[in-house]
C-alpha cells in the first residue's frame, strides 16, 4: 500500500464522510439526507484503492468523529456506514455490481445494529421498537401541535398509534429495507462519480436485475402465513414478506428501466418518470406486479434490446 500516493484520496474521503454524517446528526431535517450518503466517499475510496485502504479510511473516519459525537453514535456510523463501505467499494471494483453486495451488507448491518442497540441500550432491550417509537411520537406530536387540539390533532394521534402498532411488528424488515436502500444509493453514487472520472471500474447494469425464478414459490406460502390468525406466525411471515416484496419491486423497476432504455426515452423523460414514482408511491404497484409476474412472462427475454448499429 503506497500511502504517500493514496493519502491524497484517503484524507479527503475520510473528512467528507465524517462531515456528512455529523451534518446528519447536528443539522435538523436538512442534514439527514447528507448523513444518508455519508458512506459514498468511503465506497469510492475502496473502489479506487482496494480493501485495505477502504478499511483504513473507515477506521480513520470513525475515529475522527469520536471527539464530537457520543460513542454509541460513532459506533452506529462505523457499523452502518463506514465498515460496509469498504466491502461495497471492493465488490464494485471487482465487477460484482450493487444488488447482491448491498443485500449481503444490509443483512449483516441489520443484525449488528439491532444487536448493538440491544446490548448498549437498556430501553431498546426492554422494547426493541423504543427508539423508532420515540422518533415517530416526536414527529406526530409536532403534527398534532400544528393541527391543534381539535379533530385534526386527535386524528394525528390516532394515526400515530396505528403506525406504531404496525412498526413494532415489522421493525426488522423495515430496518433491513432501509439499510439496503442506503447501501445501494451510496454504491451507485460512488460508481457514477468513478465513471465521470474515467476510473476503470465496471458500472452496474441497472436493467439486468433479476431474482431466481424459484423464489416466487417462497412468496406464495409467506403471503398466506401473513394472513393467518396466529399473531406470532403472522409477524414472522410479515418480516419475511416485506423484504421479498421489496426485492420484486426492484426487479419490476429494473424491467421498467430496461424498456425505458429500449424506447430511447430522453433524460428529461426518465427524470419525469422517477418524479412521478416518488410523488405518487401507489404507482409503484405497477412495477411490483411486473416484478412478481416476470417469472412467467420473462419480458426482457421476449423483447430484447435491438442490436447496436455502427
Image (cartoon, rainbow, N blue to C red):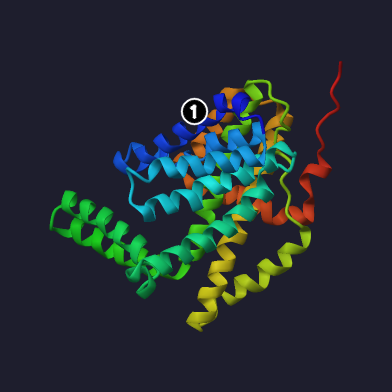
Q: Is residue 48 left or right of residue 158?
A: right
Task: Rate crowding at label 1 as few (under 14), some (14 to 19) or many (20 or more) other CA atoms within 10 Å.
Answer: some
Considering only vertical position in the picture, is 278 above or below 236?
Answer: above
**Residue displayed at 80% across by 33% down:** 305
Nearer to me, 196 or 236 = 196
Q: Quadrant of residue 196?
A: top right
**Residue displayed at 66% across by 25% down:** 195
Nearer to me, 116 or 139 = 116
Q: In this view of the protein, can residue 147 be seen by the observer?
A: yes
Nearer to me, 177 or 292 = 177
Looking at this view, name the residue that lies furthest to the left: 149
Considering only vertical position in the picture, is 78 above or below 8?
Answer: below
Considering only vertical position in the picture, is 217 above or below 284?
Answer: below
Position of residue 256 measured from the top left corner of the image (x, y, whole percent): 66, 40
SS at mark 1 in the image: helix
Q: Quadrant of residue 187?
A: top right
**Residue displayed at 48% across by 47% down:** 281
Position of residue 255 measured from the top left corner of the image (x, y, whole percent): 69, 43
In the picture, which quadrant includes the N terminus? top right
Considering only vertical position in the picture, is 114 above or below 11?
Answer: below
Residue where numbered disc 1 is placed: 12
Position of residue 143 measured from the top left corner of the image (x, y, whole percent): 23, 51
Amino acid at each position: 500500500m503506497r500511502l504517500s500516493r493514496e493519502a491524497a484520496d484517503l484524507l479527503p474521503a475520510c473528512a467528507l464522510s465524517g462531515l456528512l454524517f455529523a451534518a446528519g446528526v447536528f443539522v435538523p431535517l436538512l442534514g439527514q439526507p447528507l448523513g444518508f450518503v455519508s458512506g459514498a466517499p468511503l465506497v469510492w475510496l475502496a473502489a479506487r484503492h482496494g480493501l485495505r485502504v477502504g478499511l483504513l479510511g473507515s477506521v480513520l473516519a470513525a475515529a475522527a468523529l469520536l471527539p464530537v459525537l457520543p460513542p454509541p453514535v460513532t459506533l452506529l456510523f462505523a457499523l452502518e456506514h463506514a465498515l460496509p463501505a469498504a466491502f461495497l467499494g471492493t465488490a464494485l471494483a471487482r465487477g460484482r455490481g450493487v444488488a447482491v453486495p448491498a443485500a449481503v451488507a444490509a443483512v449483516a448491518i441489520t443484525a449488528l445494529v439491532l444487536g448493538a442497540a440491544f446490548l448498549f441500550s437498556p430501553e431498546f432491550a426492554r422494547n426493541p421498537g423504543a427508539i423508532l417509537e420515540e422518533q415517530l411520537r416526536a414527529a406526530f406530536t409536532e403534527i398534532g401541535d400544528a393541527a391543534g387540539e381539535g379533530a385534526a390533532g386527535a386524528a394525528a394521534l390516532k394515526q400515530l398509534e396505528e403506525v406504531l402498532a404496525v412498526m413494532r411488528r415489522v421493525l426488522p424488515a423495515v430496518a433491513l429495507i432501509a439499510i439496503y436502500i442506503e447501501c445501494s444509493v451510496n454504491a451507485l453514487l460512488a460508481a457514477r462519480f468513478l465513471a465521470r472520472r474515467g476510473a476503470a471500474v465496471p458500472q452496474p447494469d441497472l436493467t439486468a436485475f433479476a431474482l431466481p425464478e424459484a423464489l416466487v414459490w417462497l412468496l406464495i406460502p409467506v403471503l398466506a402465513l401473513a394472513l393467518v390468525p396466529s399473531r406470532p406466525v403472522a409477524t414472522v411471515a410479515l418480516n419475511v414478506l416485506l423484504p421479498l416484496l421489496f426485492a420484486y419491486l426492484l426487479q419490476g423497476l429494473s424491467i421498467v428501466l430496461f424498456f425505458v432504455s429500449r424506447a430511447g426515452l430522453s433524460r428529461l423523460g426518465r427524470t419525469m418518470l422517477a418524479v412521478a414514482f416518488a410523488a405518487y408511491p401507489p404507482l409503484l404497484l405497477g412495477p411490483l406486479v411486473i416484478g412478481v409476474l416476470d417469472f412467467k412472462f420473462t419480458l426482457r427475454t421476449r423483447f430484447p434490446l435491438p442490436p447496436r448499429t455502427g
